[in-house]
Amino acid sequence: MGHPMFTYDPGMGETIFEYCRTRLSLDPVPLDYGGIRDDPASQIEGIISENGNDPVKVLELFATQLATAVVSIDSPRFLAFIPNAPTKASLLFDMVVSCSSLNGTSFLESAGIVVAENQLLAFLAERAGMPPTSGGTFVSGGSLGNLSALAVARDDGRRNHPAADPRHLRVAISQEAHSSVGSALHLLGMDPLVVASRDHVMTADALRAALDADDDPASIVAVVATAGTTNAGIVDELEGIGQLTKDRGMWYHVDAAYGGAAMLGTTRRHLFAGLRHVDSFIVDPHKWLFAPLDCCALVYREPRLARVTHTQHASYLDVLHVPDNDGEVEWNPSDYAVHLSRRARGMSMWYSLAVHGTRLYAEAIDRAVSIAEEAAALIRAADHVELCRDPTLSIVLFRRIGWASSDYFTWSRRLLNDQVAMVTPSKWEGETVARFAFLHPDTSLAIVAEVLDSMR
Ligand SMILES: *Cc1c(COP(=O)(O)O)cnc(C)c1O
């Protein structure tokens, strides 16, 4: 007999597998309550103890007291923030990743993971119009993806812009850039040049005007465009901005964390053609590519530049970086972002995409766009609500005519309490408004109508 913590307990195994089987087959999953439930902390008091507890009892505590205080972001009724709607295949394979303790740090340890994750990255890069030599890794989310890419952009800027003060490099971003871009610049010691958007889109003309009007244009070494803003799903002028960054020798990063998936669909694909110009881009499989949390694909045009910035050196890591006979070092996912040890987090989507094929993915992605269009039509037809803007991708911003800001907050809480939907307020041009973010292909127009009716 081995140590008790390392011996398989079939009873505990069956209990857990049964829970997972049931959760996977719930249709629909209950929305549940998240933070609006009574504070669950008291329910688990004392559970961490010297002698432990019966595994069935602990799981039951989780199921009855904790899981109900977590909103199911995979519910077709979850329409807040950016939902997470993983396929069943990706969830099942995530169990394989967990049960096999799959590590994806280095080629030496995990060649089988590296080749599969790289196959998926190559697929995404190819759809973005990037060359076959591009590559990167999967990180925990868009925030870490943006940070990792902009660290490479900064180092590249220091090398290629000798006229600029290396301690005062700047990056042009739009007013609508995601909050994580601002955080990344702060962490990296760079300042933003905020480009005024035109109708919420960063255009090449607006960027050119901002650069030409600037006192110190040499200090601006990179541009971040957004392909699908989180609040409104707006796509910047990727093609024109790409041309401009090339002309001026600036690094071009596109944050496509949410919207990038649309390049795999059919109806909005054209908006992403300009991705072919990028030096780096991100897209989150845990958003509109139907993978479980947490997963962001980060791709560089020239991966060697990322290695210069991100490879960690230590005596015990040298073994990962021994060149082969051709002088090549194997591909280590750890060399391409701010991380070292990593879960093989690209594998859940890899399995699901390999099983289902690209056609079903395109269909599911297109479905979210069409639900947004159908919802917009319902809003146009109703007299108590109105659109703030026609949707570009799968996000719809709209107002309830006559409501004050506090009305939206009260209504949002009531909707969740009644288990109708999770829809949270946002802002549009300073005004509090309602916002639908569609991803789950099973979100029906009946659900949308139910939510709109609740605002009468
Ligand atoms: C969600 C999002 C991010 C941040 O991604 P996380 O995975 O939440 O870290 C960055 N940029 C955009 C445009 C996003 O929608």
Image (spheres, helix red, strand yellow):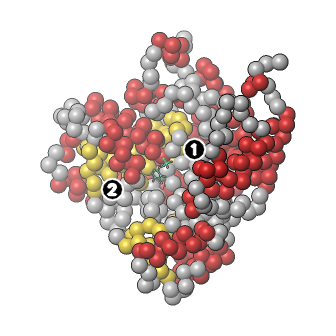
Residue 431 position in % (x across, y down)? 37, 73
Q: Quadrant of the C terminus?
A: bottom right
Lateral position of residue 258 relative to residue 427, left or right? right
Label 2 CB-ligand 1 distance < 8 A? no
- The crowding category of the residue bearing disc 2, from other C-alpha atoms within 10 Å (few below 14, some 14 to 19, many at least 20), is many
Mark 1 residue's CB less than 8 Å from ligand 1: yes
Q: Is residue 238 above or below residue 401?
A: above
Q: How many marks?
A: 2
Q: Which mark is residue 294?
A: 1
Residue type at mark 2 is Ser
Query: Residue at image x 51%, y 88%?
Result: 383
**What percent of the width, then of the height, locates residue 39?**
58, 56
Q: Give me the disc on residue 174.
A: 2
Furthest toward the bottom, the residue is 383
**Closer-to-camera residue (255/132):** 255
Numbered label attached to residue 432: none
